[in-house]
Each structure stands twice: as C-alpha cells, then as structure tokens.
Image (tube, helix red, strand yellow):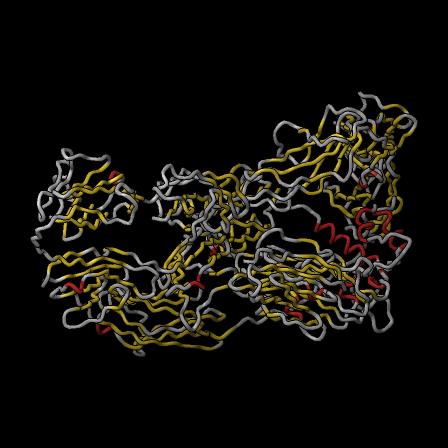
Amino acid sequence: MPPEKPKTQEAEEGSSVVFEAETEKSDAKVKWQCNSKDIASDTKYVITADGNVHSLTIKAITKEDANSYAVIAGGSKVKFELKVISKPDAPAEAPASEAGTVNVEPAPAPPPTAPTGEGHDPRPAEGECVKPHDNLSSCAGGNITFVAKVNAESLLKKPSIKWFKGKWMDLASKSGKHLQLKESYDRNTKVYTFEMHLIAAKANFAGAYRCEVTSKDKFDSCNFNLTVHGECLDIRAAFRRTSTDGNEDSGELDFSTLLKKRAVHASTEPDLDVWDILRHAPASEYEKIAFQYGITDLRGMLKRLKKMKKEEKKSEAFLKKLDPAYQVSKGHKIKLAVEVANPDVEVKWLKNGQELQPTGRYIFESVGNMRYLTINHCSLADDAAYCCVVGEEKCTTELFVKEPPILIVKNLEDQMVMKGERVELECEVSEEGANVKWEKDGVELTRDESFKYRFKKDGCKHVLMINEATKEDCGHYKVKTNGGESMAEVMVQEKELEIYQSIADLTVKAKDQAVFKCEVSDENVRGTWYKNGVEVKPDARINTTHIGRIHKLTIDDVKPEDEGDYTFVPDGYAFNLSAKLNFLEVKIDYVPRQDPPKIHLDCMGRTSESTIVVVAGNKLRLDVPITGDPAPTVIWTKGEKVNRHQHLLHQENRASVFYNVITEGDDRVHVETTKGHCVFTIEGAEKQDEGVYSVVVRNPAGEDTADINVKVVDVPDPPQIPRILSVGEDSCVVEWDPPLFDGGQPIIGYVLERKKKKSYRWMRLNFDPYPETTYEAKRMIEGVPYEMRVYAVNSIGMSRHSPASQPFVPVAPTSEPTGLCVDDISDTSISLKWRPPERIGSAELEGYGVEYCKEGTDEWIPAIQGLTERTSVIIRDLTTGDKLQFRVRAYNMAGPSPPATLAQHITIREIMQRPKIWLPRNLRQTLIKKVGDTVNIVIPFQGKPRPKVTWSKDGEPLNSAFASVRNSETDSILFIRKTERKHSGKYVLQVQIENVEDTATVTLQIVDLPGSPEALKIVDVWGFNVALEWKPPKDNGNCEITGYTIQKADKKTMEWYTIYEQYRRTHCVISDLIMGNEYVFRVFAINLVGLSPEPCSSKDSVYIQKTGIVYKPPTYKDPDFSEAPKFTHPLVNRSVVAGYNATLSCSVRGIPKPKVTWYKNKMDISNEAKYRMLSQQGVLTLEIRKPCLFDGGVYTCKAVNDSGEDSVECKLEVRRNNPQ
C-alpha cells in the first residue's frame, strides 16, 4: 500500500484537479483507473511520475468526471472519488427547450432520501438516494426525460422499477406515442439506468409523479412534481358541456381538467381553489361564488359538492380503521387492531378476499370495542391484503413481510500458511442457501479457468478454497452478505526447513564402517555431501542414500585417509550440517628417551586462557593436542587449579582414563585420549556446565597446564508482558520490557504476533527481528478485539512467547462535532448547540466535553463537569463582559476528537432583541368554536430581555376568572376550559420591552344552535300545492343561517317527512300533495352547528280537496296459460341390487296439470301393489319395493293433458346380491 494515499477531492466545473500517490520504491509500476477502466495519458488526463511520487491531473472538469477512481501499485489498490461542484452562477433550472433529467438513485439502507446539492457525487453509492428537485417545469410540446440510476453492487438480482402518476396510476400500461420506457445496465459500474421519456408534452401531463424501486427486501421511492407551461386554465370551461350542436344544455360534463395540476402563472392575486371555497362557504353563498368565478352549470356544481361531502362522511361501523399498510419481519408476530362502534357486533377477517378461520397462527380477539387479529410466526405467505368486514362496511390494509438480513454468525479467521499449501477460509451465516460475495482487497473473486479459487456451500457454511497458495495470495479477504461482512488476512510464508536429527562426530577404527545420518522436515529436499569442502563421489566403499526425510553417508572399510570434516548441504537452503570423522589407531612405541609433556594450544604462555562458546543442548568437545614421552597423564579440573593430590580426572597409563567421583554415573561426560590428543566431551551442554576448565598433563619428565573458558549460550527468556500504549483506527502502539536473561548473547531484536480475541490463530507481524521495544502494529480491523505477544531473538534463536497482552480494540477518535453555534446568550450565561460528528466509527460515543478559554490566555477550562450526552449545553455563572472562546470535543474509548471551535471570541453580554409576535397562520382568521368546547391558543414571540406580556378583550384587560393565561420566555397561552357565547370577541396580545412593543389580534367566535324560525303561515293553496312563508329566527346562534329544513305530516298518522334540506329562502311551494288528506307543516333553522332545537309549526292545517273524476276500470282479456306437458328432467338409467328398494325420478311441467302414467316394458303398472307412484310439485317418483331380477326392464313415464303429451323412459338393471 502506498505510504501516501490519494484522497477524495471536490472541484468546481471547468477547473483542474491533481491526485498524488507516493510509493515505497521509485521504480514501482503505477496504474490509474476510472470506474475500473485503465486511464491513459491524453489531453484530458495527464499522468506523471517524479521518483516515488506519482500524480494524475484531470483538466477541464465536467459533471461526467464525478466518478470513482483508483490507483494500483503492485498488489495494493487505493480507491478515491472526485466530487464536482456546480458553478455558483449556473442557472438552477434548465431552459425550457431542454429535456429535464432527474437522477433518482434508490438504496437498500437508510437514509431514504438526501437532497441533491452542490458537490454531490452523481454516481449512485450504497446507502444513498439522490432526490431530485420537488418541482420541475417544461413548456408544452417539449420532450421530458426522467432518469433513475440504481446502484446494484449489493443487490443479488436485477431490481424492478415502477413509474406512477398521481397515487395509483401505473405508467407501464400507458406506453405508446407520448410515453416510452427504456432501461440499460453498465457492467463496469454495476449501475442500472431506467428512463421514462415524455414526448411532445401536453398540459395534462402536469402532476405528481413517483418512482419506486424494489429488490427482494429492499425498497426506495422518490416523488416529484411536473409543471407544463401552456395556456391559462379557464375554470369555467370545466363546467361547459361538450356539445357539438351549439346547445349549452346538451352534451356531457368534463371535470377532468380540474383534477390535473397546472402551471402557476405570475399573478398579483393568490391562486385560489374554488372547490375549497365552495366546500367551506354557507349554502346561501353558492350562487354568488358560482357567478363570481364564472360557473354556469349550478346543478353539476351542487352534485359534485354533495359527492365530496359524502366522501368526508365518517364511517358508522368503525371508530378507528386499519392503517393503510403494516410491515413485519419474517418469523415475528403482528397484531392488527380496529375499533368498532358497536361493542356487540361480529367482524369477519379476510385475506386476499378469502375468509380466515381462527387457528394456532391466526388468533381473533374481542375486547370491548376493539377487535384484534394476531398473526404468529409470519412467513412470506402472509404477505397479502387483509380486510375487516362489519356488515356492509369494510376497511382494508396491506401487510408486508420483510425477510431478515443474512447475518454472519461465525466470522472468518486470519490464516498464515506456507507456500504451496491449501488455504480454506470458512464462515457461517444465519440462513441456509444464502448468497454471499467474496472479495480480495476490494476486488470480487470469481471462478476462473485455472480453478485458483473454489467456492463451497454446505448448509449455513460457506468456504473459499485457494489451491497451492503463493505470495500473490497474501491480502485481506472479505465475505459479504446483505446484512453484514467479515474480513480476514491471509499471509503466505516461505517454508523453513527443520532439522529433526543432525549428523554426529564419529571415531572409528580401521576396517570398521562409518555411517553419517541426518533427518530433515521435508522429504522432497535433496542434498549433497562434502568432505573437507570437496563433494563426495560414491564408489565401491562410499555410498549415499535418501529415503524419505533421512539422508545417509556410509563409508565401508575405513582407512586413515577417510579422516576429516564431513558436511551435508540441503539443496536450496543456505545452511549445512557438519561432523568430524576421527580415525583411531592404537600404537605403542617404546622410546628410551623421555620428553616433558606439552599442551599445544593457540595461546601465549603456560597459563593462557582460551574461551569456547557452545550452544545449550549441543555437544561440548574440547580437543587438546598434547605431546610427551612417555605418554603423559591427563587431569581435567573445573573451577580451580589442582595439585598432585587434588584431581577430578586423571590418567595413570597410556591407554586408560579414569573419572572422579563427581562424574561417575554421568553419561553425558566422556574423556578419551589418542596419540597426540586428549578429547573431553559433554553431551547436551547445560547452563551449569559453563566455567573455567583446566587441563594438566604430567609424566616423569615434567608437567604442563592450560585453562579453557567455556561459555554456554542459550535462547533468551520470554520478554515481559506487552503493554498497549495507544490505539488508532486500524493500528496500535505496543511496548514491552526486555527479557530478564538474554541467553548469554545480546538481543538482536523481537518478533511480534497478534490474534483476534475470539480466534486461536496467531499472525506474525514481522519476519525480521525488530530492534526496538516499541512497535506500531497496523492493518487491523476497527472494532475487533485483539491480543499481542512478543518473542525475543538472539544469535542462538527465538525465545518462548511472552504472556498475551490485555485485550484491546483498535478504534479511532470520532471526527469533530459539526455546526457549533451560539443558541442564546445573557449577561451571565450562554447556550451552545451542535450536531453529532459526521464519522463516529465502531466505538460507542461516550459524550461531549465543552471547554472555554479567555481572550489572551491559552488555558482551556472545562465548562461542565464530566461529559454530556446532549448536543446542547447552557453554561452559567459567567462574568459579564468577558470575551471567551468555546470548543466542543467528542469522546469515545479512543479519546477526544479534534475540537469544533467557534469562529471568534464571544462577549458575555445579553443582546437587545426587539419584541416580535409570530402569529400562527390558523389564528390570522376568525377562530370558530362551539359552545362548551375548549380553547387553547399558543402564540410564540421573541424579545430580549424577557418582555412584558398582557392580554385584553375588546379594549379591556383580561380577567383571570374569565380566561386563563400562562406566559413563558418564548410564548403565551390563552386557555378557556368551557366556552360560552360571552367569550366571543377580539383578543389582543401585547408584548413590550421598555418603549418598544408589538401586538397581535385574535378573533374568537363562539357559535351555538340557532333559535326556531318565526311566524310560519300558509299563504296559498291550489290543486295539490301549498305555499308557505316564515321569518328567520331572532337568535342565529352567533353565526349565519345556512338554510332551513321543511317537513310535512299527514294529520291521520302525524309521521313527519322532509321535503327540503338546506333550503336558503324563507318561502317555498310544496307540491305533489295527496287529495283528500289534511296536512300540517313545520320548519327548522340550520347554521354551522346544526338544526335548531325546536321547529316552528304551522297553526293551521291544509285539506286537499277531492275533484269530481269518475273512475272507469279498464277491461282485460284473460290470458291463456295452457301448456303441453314437457319433461324438464328425464329418467336416468340405473343399476340396483336385488332386495333393496329402488326409485326412478323425473320432473314435468304443463298447464293444466297433466295425468301421469307409468309403464314397464310398455305395460301399465299403475294398479300393481309392488309399485308406488308419487307426484309433488311436478317431481314424479316411482318407488319399486324390493326388486327382484324379473323387475329389470324398460320403464316409461307418460304425461298427458288437453294441450298434448310427452314421455321419457330409462333402463333398470337388477343385480344379484352376492353376500361376502
């Protein structure tokens, strides 16, 4: 990985940008990529290299250059991005002639939407949705293109997209001349592009559009409005009939134009909704409003208003309906609840139109007015539409069952293998059959022709196998699912050859056999034997063999010339094994002369000291050349000089050597002498064998002595337990103390290993000894617990490992808090607020620390004790007039983040703020409440210092007994628990600071039911008609009378029937009365609250006189209903068992009723007792009692009446009764 990595940058359109990367070696080959495609140097891209610094320059940046880039050096790859910022003077909206393009990028994870702004990366990214402008506009006749880009990197299959207009209109079925849908896929960027083209836009294309993208359990959507500029909309045209003959009253009404959104034209008057005005206006004003806005079809207008009011009518069966949709995770349970008006009513639950029955999974509950449907252990089959039915009414909902994300239950383990070995990375997921994706250093792995990578799936286990690992296979491997990921590091190390058995020194006699034998760890390793540096050639006496891991050199019939140093060198490894072959020849010479003994060592003087170093566990061999005649006696001592009476080892004749009592029974110590040599050997030297060894040689001619210093060296002791000094995002700094004993040789360095806490594999961090006792370990995974241990290395070898360190978690401090600003300030306090850091990391945020510093000093003083979890704080008890600087830092287990600091020092002094009342929009018009309702008016205001707040009504101060008032620093509340008519009026709120004030007026209107109309009288009676007249009520209930309800009743029954509702005039004509009846009438007044409690009834009744009309009944001809017999259901052939009753049935119709006769084989059987004939409602039945074999045959039924006859027949087969 390069030491200096290129980072994501932002640049303005038209400018240039430079990305730089620094490599470890100056001759490293570097490759630049854009969206995984190689970049070559040209007029757009300039690639340069200066030593180990490589740069990429992008000129004349456009929006298309906002992509993902990468630099590759050797086996390392670093990704970065370029974000392009629009020029500030660029127009916010494309020209009308250009096609509007909308980028909609759905993502699988939150946030659901994010506004498109300057510097935003136009390429879709995981977890990001780019939302277009809410309002788009185009001119009529232009072409419009909507583009939706979906990032499919984390999707396992192609997503599905739907385009909607309005709420439910699916545009896929509307494709044609003016609407076209297209889609494409970029394999390099893995981005799906969906396009919707509107060709030759018309005015009715305007409206709200929605794009929905789904992929299995992921969903996202985006809404936007389209405005088409065209001719101005004339609302009167919507109420003109589509007539072709010029007749204004013919043709059909077309209201569709009112349902489409139109372009907003510049006007000094606000755009008003006529239907909204009509819906809230009193009925008496309908005529005035219709003519004001040019509506000529009053009847059509009233029909539509009536329909709209019916839709607003509340359900009679349900007090609370089901929500439009519910969502539940797979395997969980959900409870659907409705509230019904009648607590005793029975409800039905339907699923996709089919009635549900209570089972173990579907549970029905009834508690008071509540009805519950509980679904246990939801599966994908429960994803359906559900309906609750009460009588004729029903409410519906949709249940969406969400599949849980695939979680990684068992993470990958770091692995260290030898070159050529097989690597298996294994993980376990939460569900069987799940799809996973494998990556190496950010690049997806696939099956290739060389079968380098193999993927295995066994239930919940997924295994990645790498055959014959090489150095190129080192790196970070990652497995991904839609619910998580796991990463592990693979390290490939060259094989080290281990020596299981080394060759040993040999001493053989003449004619004997000498065998050198060694054993190594790899049976495939060959080697070469050398004698005194010259390669040994096999012959008749010398033979070399290699069987498995064992190598042998055999010398038969040993001769004096075979003596020497023999060496075995393994092929391909830089070390050898050596041993010495000594030829033993015993020869006694009798020399008459005597020579004094002498020790021939490479030293000066008789008492010179020589030092020999031996590795613990190896053989200590002291070979001392000596001369003397006769053969001297050799005495070995350790630790001090000896005299003639003190000795440990001595020789009394030429051929025999004796051991002192200390060495008796110790098989490790051997002493042997030959002519001219005395050899002292200790097998497997130990630490206590270290010291000064003295050798004394004596004969009758004299003596000689020499001291040999033997030093036994070993591997060092383990280092002390390592300590973690600090941690970073992917690194840590570890420190340890040297071992207590260095093994007799200086410490060369240390080798470190790490492992994940839950793992058992230790990963080596360095292969060359590290000389210091402080080390920075990198390339760790943030948020995963680790442990460290250390080995000490000297020239002899590596020590045992130290105890493992305390577990630690690599984490980095968060980024600095954002948006630090002053919320409020007074003479002794200040209020600060901020937003959380953009990057928090894997460690939990512990809180925020707030500090301040006085101007002219560098000392930061904590403003609060400890940490606060809130993103705002009030700092009190400050000195008025001080200039302070404030900063906020976020803390996690890694420590404090970089501070967020205010731009300048703040003076602690309250700032004067003019009083201002923020009157809510709903209070700017008359507030209408019914008698007995509760009034709760909240009006916010501002002002510093705290203003004085007063309320008044109709110019008089407000009495606390009349209404309750509560004031705070930022708002005032007027509360009336139970309103009366006297509470109507104008309420004035006044906010005052010294001589500055602000006022606001709220008009409250308390309305009640109206009184009864007055003076109802009958003006005229003619024919079947009556004319009535009355006066409005004296008490209108403090609001306008919207109409009257007129009713009539027959004096005989006194049942009242409504003739007119919402009648606006104070006179009417009642028609279609029945002559001979006597009627009375009454009238109710109607206002905003409802009908008047009592009606105004007529004092007199009206009798409708009968006219002298003679009734002549009409004459009718009797109809002829006669009909010939006809069999509507014929006889059917039957086969029966003998002994059991049998019946033959048919049906016949005919008028008059026909006479029925039964025949068997054309013989009349009407009078036979065995047969029983029945006739009921035209159904004819012949019952045969216990038929025998002779009753089989052809049966005929014949029907006869005056209009004709008809017959049917059948065959009857009688079978024998065969008992079991």
Q: Point out residue 883 in the picture as x, y percentages from the top left corner.
A: 79, 30
Quarter of the rendering containing residue 189: bottom right
Determine whether, in the image, residue 1102 is placed left or right of residue 554: right
Q: Residue furthest bottom?
A: 1162
Q: Is residue 225 above or below residue 641?
A: below
Q: Is residue 693 above or below residue 1193?
A: above
Q: Point out residue 637 in the picture as x, y percentages from the top left corner.
A: 20, 38
Q: Is residue 90 above or below residue 594?
A: below
Please name the residue shown 34% across and 42% down the image: 743
Determine whether, in the image, residue 705 is placed left or right of residue 1089: left
Q: Can residue 955 be seen?
A: yes
Quadrant containing the N terminus in the rendered view: bottom right
Please name the residue shown 20% across and 60% down the image: 517
Please name the residue shown 72% across and 66% down the image: 59
Q: Can residue 259 be seen?
A: no
Q: Nearer the viewer, residue 850 or 345?
A: 850
Q: Point out residue 119 in the picture as x, y percentages from the top left corner.
A: 71, 57
Q: Nearer the viewer, residue 215 or 754?
A: 754
Q: Point out residue 527 in the picture as x, y percentages from the top left corner.
A: 27, 66
Determine whether, in the image, residue 356 is placed left or right of residue 894: left
Quadrant containing the C terminus in the rendered view: bottom left
Quarter of the rendering containing residue 244: bottom right
Q: Nearer the viewer, residue 1114 or 126?
A: 126
